[in-house]
Amino acid sequence: MSERLVSVALPVGLDRAFTYSVPAEWASAPEPGTRVLVPFGARGLVGVVRDVVGEPTAGKLRRVEETLDPPGAPSLTPGLLRLCEWVQDYYVAPVGEVYRLALPGLLTGADVRKASLTRAGEAALASSRDFVLTSQGGGPYVPSVAEQRVLAALATAPRQELAVERLTSLRPRINGVLRILGELAARELCTVRWDDGADEAARVETHYRRTDYLRGDAGGEAKIQEIVGRSKQRRALLDMLETAAPGVWLPAGELRGPFPRLRELIGGLLEPGLVVAEERLRALDPFAAGTPESSTPQAPTSDQQRALASLIADMDAGAFAVSLLHGVTGSGKTEVYLQLIAEVRRRGGGAIVLVPEIALTPQLSDRFRARFGDTVAVLHSGLTPRQRLDAWQQIRMGLRPIVIGARSAVFAPVADLKVIVVDEEHDPSFKQEDGVRYNARDVALVRARDERALAVLGSATPALETYEQARAGRYRWLRLDTRPTPRPLPKVELVPLAVHRPDPDTLLTARMKTALTETVAAGEQAILFLNRRGFATTLVCGSCGALHQCPDCSAPSMTYHLQRNRLMCHLCGHIEGPPERCRTCGEGELLHGSAGTERVELAVSKEIPRARVLRLDRDTSRGKGLIETLTRFRNHEADILVGTQMLSKGHDFPGVTLVGILQADHGLGMPDLRAAERTFQLLTQVSGRAGRGERAGRVLMQAYAVSHPAVALAAEHDYAGFAAWELEKRQQLGNPPFGFLALLRISGPDEVAVRRRAEQLGAFVRACVEGVASKQEGRAPLALLGPVPSPIERVNRKIRWQLLIRASARPPLRWLLKQLRPQLGLDGSGDFKTSAVLDVDPQTLL
Ligand code: ADP
Ligand code: ZN
C-alpha cells in the first residue's frame, strides 16, 4: 500500500501547511478538519488536517502521532474548513493562524498531554539502575539511556507526572521524546493522557493584587521605574493593577486578554513584592449569572411585520439572501431578530448573532437569554479558556443552537445554520486590526452564502458599502421608519462653539451646564459624550502652540490621567509624569488643550454639586466594573454618565432625557477615508440614547463645524442625505463602495530599512499594475498610491510606511494580492528588520 499523507496546518505563524504520514496500522487517514498531534521540532503540536494528499514527497516524513477527534466528528466541519480557507486566501493570512480563529485556545496549539509513571515503569527504572537485569537476546527488557532519562524525569516529578511539553524541553535535550513516550506507553511503563484542564484547575485561578509597597512613597516612583525597567507592557500591567479598587484581586484570565505574555511580565513584579499572587476560586461568568426574567414576544408593528414576513419567506426558500434591516435607533430591530430566531428554532435550526464588543452590551444578550433561556451561548472576551471550550463544545453538540458574540463568533460551530444576524453592522469593531485582519461582517456573508443561510445586517446608520448594495437591489432593503413606542426621535439642538465659548478646560458651554442642571433638578438622567476616538489632544504648549506628542509615536496621542498624575499614550502605552516644558520649543509651559473624561467628570461634579456623576471609558470599564457602572446608572444611582464612544453602543437607559455631545466635529479633521462616515454614525448612535423611556429626549450637540454635513445631517437624523453627500465624494475618488482597497504597511525600527523595503514592494506592485494596464484599454483597473510614510509615521518607535492599492473591481485586486503574497515573507523567509502587513478592505488608513 502506498504511503498515506495528510497536510496539517500548525499554529506556527507560517504561511504553509506541513505534510505528515499516517501510520500504516491506522484503518483510515484522519479526515479534513480533524485535530491531530504531530511532532514539530522536539515538541508536539496540535494541528488541523487540511486535506489528505495522495502524492508522497521525497525524504522521510514524520508521522502523525494521534488523532484528537473521534472518527466522523472532526473539530472543524467541512463548512468551517471552507470558511477558513476563504479567509486565508482573501485576507492573505498565514495558513496556521486562520484555524486559531475558528477553534478556542484549548483546542489548538501545544501538546497538553501529561505522562505519568506506572508501577512497571518504576520497576524498570529501578532495575536498570541496579544493573540487575542484563538483557541479551530474549532476556527481559532494559530501557535505553534515553528511555531511562524520561522515566527518571517522571519519577522525580510531583505525583510522578509531567506535562509532555516539559519533557520536550528538558536540558540536556532528549532526542525523540515523543517517539520514546510512545514506546514506553506501549510497554505500559508510563501512561500518556490528554489533559484539557477538566480537573480542579478549572475551578481555581491565579489572581493578582497590587501591594502597598512603594505606594505613595517619596521617591517611590523612581524605584518602581527601576523595577519595571523598559517594558511598556509591564508598566501598563502594573498600572492596570494599580487602578483596581483597593483590595480587589484581578484574575489571570482577565489580564491575559490585554497582556498575552502575562506570565513573563508579572514575574518581574511579583519578585520585588509590588504585586502578590494567590490561587482563588474563579469568579462565575458574569454573563451567565442568574437567569433574566423570561420575556414574551411583543405584537409586531406593521413595519416589523413586513420585515419578518420577508425574512421568513427567504429562510423557507432555503437559498442565500442578504437583507439590510435599516431602522432608526429604538425602532425595534432587536425584536425582529428575536422573532426571526424563534422561527428558526421552530424549524429546528441554529442562528448566530454578531454584536460589536459584546462586553459592552450585557443587556442585549440578556434579552436573548430571557427569550430563549439555556439554548443561548454567549461568547464574550471575559470567558476563561475553559469556559470558552465548554461553550464551544455545547454549541458543537447542538445543546446551544443560538450563539451571541463579538466578531469571532462568526466561526461558531452551529449546526444547520439558518440565520446570521450582524447587529450594528457598520461598527468598526467587526474588523480585527491585528493578526488575521478580517471583517466579521463580510465573513458572515461568505458563510451564509456557503451554508445557504440568511444574512441579516441591522443598523440605523448602515456602512456605505452595505447601503449601496441595498440601493442597487442586491440586498433586500427592509426599513423600520418609526419607533414602536410613542417616543419620536429626540430633538437635536446644535450649539456652535464659535459663538458659545466653552470652558477651555472642560468644553462645557453655559447652555450645556444649564441643560444638565435642569435635567438633574427634574429627577431625570443625562449622558455626556466625548467624541475622542483615542486621539486626544490634551496638552498644548503655551508659547509655541505645539501639541505634546508621545516620544515614541508621531501622534498627539497622549492623554492626561488626573488621578494618577500621568500622561499615557493610547497608541503604544508609553507613560510619563507630567512634563514641565514643551518638548518642541523647550520653553513654553504646557496647557490643557481639551478635556478628557476624567476632567469632565470632576468639573461637572463641581459645577452641579447635586449631581451624582459616573464615568465610563476604557479605564473604568473592565470586567465587572463595566457591568456595575451600567447597572448603577440604569438603576438611577447616578444622574450623569460621562463617557466615550463606548456609550454609543446599543445601551437602553429609559431614564435618560438629555444627551450632551461636547465636541461633535472632533475627529473630522483626521486624514482618514471614513472620518466623516464614522462621525455621522457616532453622533446618530449617541443621540439615539435619549428619550427611550416614558419621557421625550433631547440632544445638545456642541461643535465648531456646525454646518459640516456629518454634523448638520446627523442633527436632522437625515441618513439618506448624508449618504448621498458622502457617496458622491467616494465615487469621484473611486473609493469604497465604488472601488476596492488594500493597504500594505511596512514597519520596523530602522528608517532606512523600512523605506528600502517599501520601495522594493512598491516597485513590485507598480510592475504588476502597469502590466495589467498595458493589456487594458480605457481606465486602468488597478492603481498604486505610494509608497509614502503613514499618516501616523511612528508608533512605538517603529517607522511606518504604506502603499495603497486601489482597484475598480475585486478580481484584479485579488489577482494582484496573489502575486504579492510570496513577497511578504509570511513563510518566514523575509528579512526580520521590517514587517510587511496587508490590510484588505482597510477600515482606517492611519
Ligand atoms: P433597536 O434594536 O432598533 O434599537 P429595540 O428592539 O431595542 O430597537 O426596541 C426599542 C424599544 O421598543 C424596546 O424597549 C422594545 O422593547 C420596544 N419594542 C420593540 N418592538 C416593539 C413592539 N412591537 N411593540 C412594543 N414595543 C416594542
Ligand atoms: Zn506612543
Image (cartoon, rainbow, N blue to C red):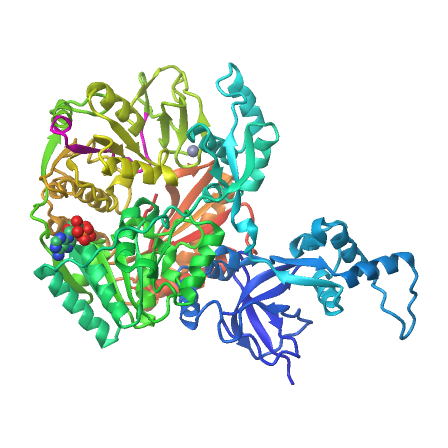
Taking the spot 92% from the left edge, 65% from the top edge, the residue there is 134
Residue 49 point in image, percent of width and height: 53, 69
Give the x, y percent position of residue 550: 41, 29
Q: Which residue is at the far bottom?
A: 1
- In the image, 788 versus 663, the foreground residue is 663
Q: Is residue 125 above or below residue 650?
A: below
Q: Main secondary structure of the magenta part?
A: loop
**x 55%, y 53%: residue:** 830
| Residue under the point 38% across and 23% down | 563
Q: Magenta part of the protein: which range?
A: 519-538
The answer to which quarter of the image holds residue 123 is bottom right
Query: Residue 768 in the image: x percent, y percent?
Result: 40, 61
Would residue 769 be counted in the magenta stretch? no
Horizontal relation, residue 42 to residue 405: left or right: right
> Which of the pair 458/771 is nearer the observer?
458
Q: Position of residue 376 (x, y in %)?
A: 33, 59
Residue 694 position (above or below residue 321): above
